[in-house]
Image (tube, rainbow, N blue to C red):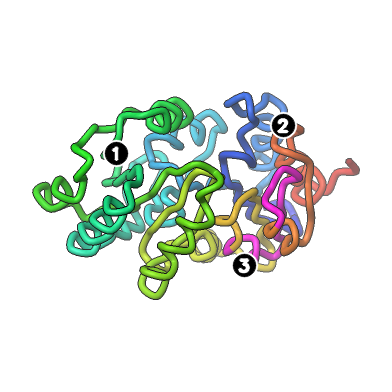
Amino acid sequence: MKQMRYKLIVSDFDGTLRGRDGGVSSETIKTVKKYVDEGGVFALCTGRMPKSILPYARQLGLKGLVVAYQGAIIEDIDSGKLVRDGRIPVSDAVEMCEFMQKNGWHIHVYDNDDLYVNMDDDFRVWYEKACNVCGILTPFDISSVVREKNISPHKVIVICPAEQRSGVLSALTKRYGDRYYVTSSTDNLVELVQRGCDKGGALSYLAQHYGIPLAQTIAIGDNLNDLPMVRAAGLGVAVENGEKLLKQEADFITRSCNEDGVAYVIKKFGLGENV
């Protein structure tokens, strides 16, 4: 392996690696491949479901592990083997959905590559288009489906208008924050996964798996769910378009997702180029 100061770079996807136009730029793809060819390890760590992120991992030519659902799933890209499979117990998932339904919220329940959706509205259309997935529409009473199908989900989320996010996040943190990891990945999403299944824990797992000290890792993100890995990494990076709190805690602020911010970090810190 080339003598690199940072041997493992872990990046969020939406709002970080992925540009606002919906794709990954050719410049970023080229830079990631150069870093890997020279001995670095590059990994994706996202809140997305596995089948939504794997096409991009393959587009980047990545091997090894990919992180989905904030860290509830860590999967081998080639074999599909799950090395982490963190699920919410059925009884807790039913209770969560009942609470969310009482508030009239749009709910998603994720079981590996199955997505259950309780409202057929603009949020469903937006989400399915953005993530290139197709949900299974349930009655509004999605808790009954979770109970009947005995679903132990990897993640449960609420989709809401941006102006309601802080209230939803506060309500769910108050009710479940002592038992579950409650976070947000965009202005419209509030998410719950098993405690310990956050991106900081995922980064630590990847570093141990590849035998790389945390001091030699970089984590790059844009939103609240990226805070744990930005805090844990040797170099925590926020993109310019990121949340204010993340940028305050980051060691370095790179260019925006539309300006190849991840590629800039790889060149500057991973490859040691003068950029």
- The residue lying at 73 percent from left, 60 percent from top is 250
Up the image or down, 141 lies above or below 5; here it is: above
Type of amino acid at the residue the image marks with label 3: Ala
Type of amino acid at the residue the image marks with label 1: Leu
- CA distance for labels 1 and 3: 30 Å
Q: Mark 2–mark 3 contact, CB under 8 Å?
A: no
Q: Nearer the viewer, residue 66 or 146?
A: 146
Tally of marks: 3
- CA distance for labels 1 and 2: 29 Å
* Mark 2 vs mark 3: in front: 2
Q: Find residue 197 and report its image quarter.
A: bottom left
In the rendered structure, find residue 115 and report the number of the disc placed on it.
Answer: 1
| Element assignment for label 3 | helix
Q: Find residue 20 and report its image quarter.
A: top right
In the rendered structure, find residue 258 and report the number of the disc placed on it.
Answer: 2
- CA distance for labels 2 and 3: 25 Å
Q: Mark 1–mark 2 contact, CB under 8 Å?
A: no
